[in-house]
Amino acid sequence: MGTDPLAENAIRPTIVLFDLDGTLVHHVNPRVLQMLEFLDDCSHRGARLAARFRLMRRNCVSERTPKLLVHKAIHKVRRKSVEEMLEPCETMRGVLERLRAEGVALGVVSNGLGRGYGHDVLGAFDLQKYFSAAVFREDVSRGKPWPDSIITALRGLGRDLRANDVIWYIGDQRKDIAAAQAASAALGRAIRPFALGARAALGTVEARISPTQIMWSAADFERTVSATFETDYRGRSLVDPLPAPLL
């Protein structure tokens, strides 16, 4: 018999990791986010080519600090404050409050720079209080879709991973889904990726992940979290489907 995907979502998470841009905060001008994601993808492809070249040079140190020239250039020319550029997702703030009240360990994982951006965002919108770990691009040698940032966040929660930990990760890009899967493979344990929006949904389709892990809005994820922590959820899950629609 196959596993009921609705019952799988009913397993309460003990650790939840969040992407930042497009998930916890939204850009006032969506085109800016699209440009940043495009440049980040270009940076990733360039890094892959550089990694192949380094494999040919055995005397190179593979774990040296990344230069991140593209990321630094973007933030160097930034003229607006984060409050002018971004707005927090209040629905996700409610999710963070609920998860914290339930004793869930929380972390944020971003491909953006922490210095001059990410830490400013968390501080400006009073989000840092929710997270035991915050991992940004300069904290790892490889960003998403590589698994490094998710693994680093899990190791930085202030406690050891437990055998019974249930780990969720939610993000709005295909690279988020790929990073969660790569981290699952690297750690040898399941990390359940949740797609937020159409771009990440494509990643779940490509990876043949359950449609119940597709969230079309923050409100969908809020309902999923609330339902998961309801004591009678298992009893009613067969008649009340989760909000993520089938594709």
Image: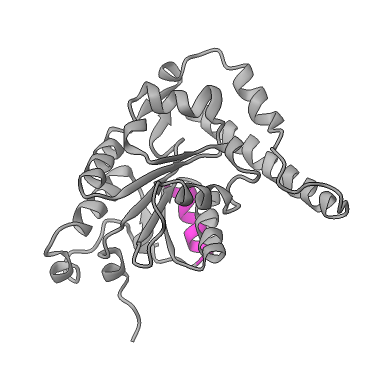
Comparing 201 with 126, the one in front is 126
Judged from this view, the residue extending furthest toward the bottom is: 1
Q: Position of residue 43 (x, y in %)?
A: 69, 39
Q: Position of residue 17 (x, y in %)?
A: 40, 48
Q: Which residues are magenta?
A: 197-207
Quadrant of the drawing holding the C terminus: bottom left
Q: Which quadrant holds residue 229?
A: bottom left
Q: Position of residue 216 (x, y in %)?
A: 36, 49
Q: Is residue 60 magenta?
A: no
Quadrant of the drawing holding the N terminus: bottom left
For image coordinates 43% across by 26% down, the residue present is 121
Q: Position of residue 184 (x, y in %)?
A: 50, 63
Q: Which quadrant holds residue 164?
A: bottom left
Going by the image, does 168 lie left or right of 4? right
Q: Is residue 151 visible?
A: yes
Going by the image, does 46 lie left or right of 160? right
For image coordinates 32% across by 70% down, the residue present is 5
Q: Which quadrant holds residue 246?
A: bottom left
Q: Is residue 36 above or below residue 95?
A: above
Q: Is residue 203 magenta?
A: yes
Q: Is residue 36 above or below residue 226?
A: above
